[in-house]
Image (cartoon, rainbow, N blue to C red):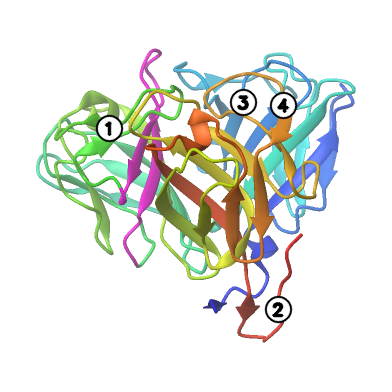
């Protein structure tokens, strides 16, 4: 049985569903904390995902499903503010995933909170960086400048090594989102915005795994271009709250069970040995087993549904033969957040 020191996971991660009203100043409350990373998607229409964070600022927008450079939105447009119990959205002049009138919208919210800045180290010239971190939940946001030199080290401030990272160069259109996974190793890289299989490279992470202080970069311009700004979302494992791992499909509708040691409230996964879409599930959309509503981080598609998986008290079970989730010889990575079976307060959780 997995025990955790995080007795209430919703103090660090929470999914919020709401209906857009198409007006300025639409306050979304009930998140339970002031979020520092918010990922939004209009479930009703084929519009871009919207990614904002407190380090870059509320008017700086990225989309997980494309390679566009960071966009700066006008005042009172799209995403207005990070608030004490949620956030405020506006008329979404530029994007349809924040407040379209009548749209069903999902927002996934992470708390960081402790902020700071410094200078990067390692090979080459040090560059300024800024960050926000939550060491309790193992999450940090780091905005840094690359230096184009192999061995450039970036402090992540987590206090333990991150095993999953998502990053994006901010200034260059056409450059992919990159995903580092300890499960795949430090010579492998995935793109969040595409369905491509995993690639082999030595110049993204310099063939070096993150340690308790830094993650290390090679010469690749997407990960470490000289004098370009890059945002990195970094995750360290915390027993009973998050899990970053892999599984092998069995090609059967009575599919693979993946043990996480917690009841997942958010899961994304990707087949790594072949082209396939990323899939995203949470415990709020639909809200019961087993026909889960799904979205695609690499696509602008509206939400669709089917019999996909069961969310269990200690993991998730695949219920489809889809190649994106359960090919008989397929290998997959996943990132999950949730609530442990028993915390230090000895209060058990249950399956949904």
Return the mark for residue 303: 4
Q: Which residue bears the numbered disc 2?
A: 348
Q: Indicate the quadrant where residue 155 lies.
A: bottom left
**In the image, residue 329 lies at what x, y percent?**
37, 37
**In the image, residue 334 lies at what x, y percent?**
46, 46
How many angstroms separate mark 1 from mark 3 (CA)?
22 Å
Residue drawn at 52 percent across, 22 percent down = 65
Label 1 Cα crowd, 10 Å radius (few <14 / some 14-19 / many 20+)? many
Q: Earlier in the sequence, mark 4 or mark 1?
A: 1
Q: Earlier in the sequence, mark 4 or mark 2?
A: 4
How many angstroms separate mark 4 from mark 1 (CA)?
31 Å
Highlighted magenta segment, given as a residue range: 160-183
Q: Tell me, yes or no, whether the highlighted magenta stretch contains residue 223.
A: no
**Residue situated in front as seen by the camera: 148 or 346:** 346
Q: Earlier in the sequence, mark 3 or mark 4?
A: 3
Q: Tell me, yes or no, whether the highlighted magenta stretch contains residue 173.
A: yes
* Residue at disc 1, secondary structure: helix
Label 2 Cα crowd, 10 Å radius (few <14 / some 14-19 / many 20+)? some
Return the mark for residue 135: none
**In the image, residue 126 lies at what x, y percent?**
19, 43
- Regarding residue 56, the answer to whether it shows in the image is no
Return the mark for residue 49: 3
Label 3 Cα crowd, 10 Å radius (few <14 / some 14-19 / many 20+)? many
* Residue at disc 4, secondary structure: loop
* Numbered disc in front, either 1 or 2: 2
* Residue at disc 2, secondary structure: loop
Q: Earlier in the sequence, mark 1 or mark 2?
A: 1
Q: Does 108 sit above or below residue 339?
A: above
Q: Indicate the quadrant where residue 345 lies.
A: bottom right
Residue drawn at 73 percent across, 36 percent down = 106
Q: Which residue bears the numbered disc 1?
A: 223
Residue drawn at 24 percent across, 47 percent down = 185
């Amino acid at each position: 049985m997995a025990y955790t020191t995080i007795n209430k996971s919703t103090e660090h991660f929470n999914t919020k569903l709401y209906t857009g009203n198409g007006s300025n100043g639409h306050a979304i409350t009930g998140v339970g904390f002031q979020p520092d990373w918010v990922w939004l998607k209009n479930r009703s229409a084929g519009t871009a995902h919207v990614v904002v964070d407190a380090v870059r600022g509320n008017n700086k927008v990225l989309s997980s499903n494309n390679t566009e450079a960071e966009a700066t939105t006008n005042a009172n447009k799209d995403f207005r503010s990070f608030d004490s119990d949620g956030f405020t959205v506006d008329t979404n002049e530029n994007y349809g995933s924040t407040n379209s009138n009548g749209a069903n919208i999902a927002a996934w919210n992470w708390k960081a909170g402790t902020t700071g800045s410094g200078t990067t180290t390692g090979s080459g010239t040090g560059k300024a960086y800024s960050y926000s971190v939550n060491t309790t939940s193992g999450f940090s946001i780091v905005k840094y400048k690359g230096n184009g030199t192999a061995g450039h080290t970036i402090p992540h401030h987590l206090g333990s090594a991150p095993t999953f990272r998502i990053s994006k160069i901010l200034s260059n259109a056409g450059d992919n989102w990159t995903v580092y996974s300890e499960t795949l190793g430090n010579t492998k890289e995935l793109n969040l915005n595409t369905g491509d299989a995993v690639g082999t490279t030595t110049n993204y992470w310099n063939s070096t795994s993150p340690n308790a202080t830094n993650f290390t970069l090679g010469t690749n311009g997407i990960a470490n271009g000289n004098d370009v700004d890059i945002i990195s979302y970094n995750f360290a494992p915390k027993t009973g709250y998050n899990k970053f791992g892999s599984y092998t499909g069995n090609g059967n509708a009575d599919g693979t069970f993946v043990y996480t040691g917690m009841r997942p409230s958010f899961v994304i996964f990707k087949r790594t040995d072949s082209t396939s879409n990323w899939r995203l599930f949470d415990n709020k959309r639909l809200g019961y087993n087993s026909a889960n509503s799904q979205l695609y981080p690499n696509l602008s598609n509206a939400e669709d549904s089917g019999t996909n998986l069961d969310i269990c008290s200690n993991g998730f079970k695949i219920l489809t033969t889809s190649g994106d989730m359960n090919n008989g010889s397929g290998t997959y990575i996943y990132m999950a957040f949730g609530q442990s079976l028993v915390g230090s307060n000895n209060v058990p959780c249950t399956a949904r």
